[in-house]
Image (tube, helix red, strand yellow):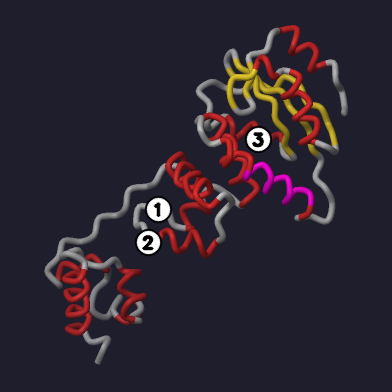
Amino acid sequence: MQNDKNHILSFIREMAADNGGVPPGQRKFGRATGISSSAWRGTHWSSWSQALQEAGFPPNKPSARISDQTVLKRLVEVIGELGRFPTSAELQLRSKQDPSFPSRGVIARLGRQPKLLSKLIDYCQLNTGHDDVERACVSLLHARKRYGRPKPLPTCVYLIQVGHDYKIGWTANLERRMRDMATYVAEKPSLIHTIPTDDPLGVEVYWHNRFANKWIRGEWFALTSEDVRTFRRWKTM
């Protein structure tokens, strides 16, 4: 029988031989053989590590946790290659072709797409050379906020200070944006002012153009105290 203990051990050894001597993980084994864990757990072994040991291999070590920054970096690379945000199927295929690429489950750890897009935008702004990826993410985020819900979300253009630099951007969830930024910047971000608007991209572009000579990178500017006062005079646009 396929679920017989000796057959399972034989399958493990065959798969290891085909993989350069590295035994399969529990999930990979199940997908390849169709033998679920219920066929052996509590019957032949209490854990997959025990099965590997009886087959003559050391137990697989748990994979090291991929940092959020690494996940964002790999996603930025894919978006740069495709020129757009990848589909779920494309992410799944990439992780199968490249074992070092984060799985969909790991990517999901960063939140649903709107939150993930916001984190990708912040990553691009803090790491130069990804302007095309930033534009793609901003465009998709704006499209989701505009068309993905029955009612438009309240939006604002904000001025946030981090150290000596200032960030001018827009968001439909200021509290979340502040919380997310705090995980990516070296110093605690400080909210200076917000301008409620139903045209966040247009208002953002206005202020970016107005302070173009103070531009540093992405949405970051080296503003003077007078520039800050000018921004704070605007209550709505």
Please name the residue shown 83% across and 37% down the image: 199
Q: Is residue 10 left or right of residue 35?
A: left
| Viewer-side residue, 190 vs 158 | 158
Q: CA distance from mark 3 to mark 1?
A: 26 Å
Which mark is first along the chain, 1 or 3?
1
| Viewer-side residue, 123 vs 173 | 123
SS type, badge 3: helix
Q: Which residues are magenta?
A: 136-146
Q: Amino acid at mark 2?
A: Gln
Q: Amino acid at mark 3?
A: Arg
Q: Disc 1 vs disc 2: Cβ atoms closer than 8 Å?
A: yes
- The residue furthest left is 56
Q: Amino acid at mark 1?
A: Phe
Q: Residue 158 in the image: state x and y as whole percent.
A: 73, 27
Which mark is first along the chain, 3 or 2?
2
Q: Residue 183 in the image: state x and y as whole percent.
A: 53, 32
- The residue identified by callout 2 is 97
Q: CA distance from mark 1 to mark 2?
A: 8 Å
Q: Which mark is residue 177?
A: 3
| Mark in the foreground, 1 or 2 | 2
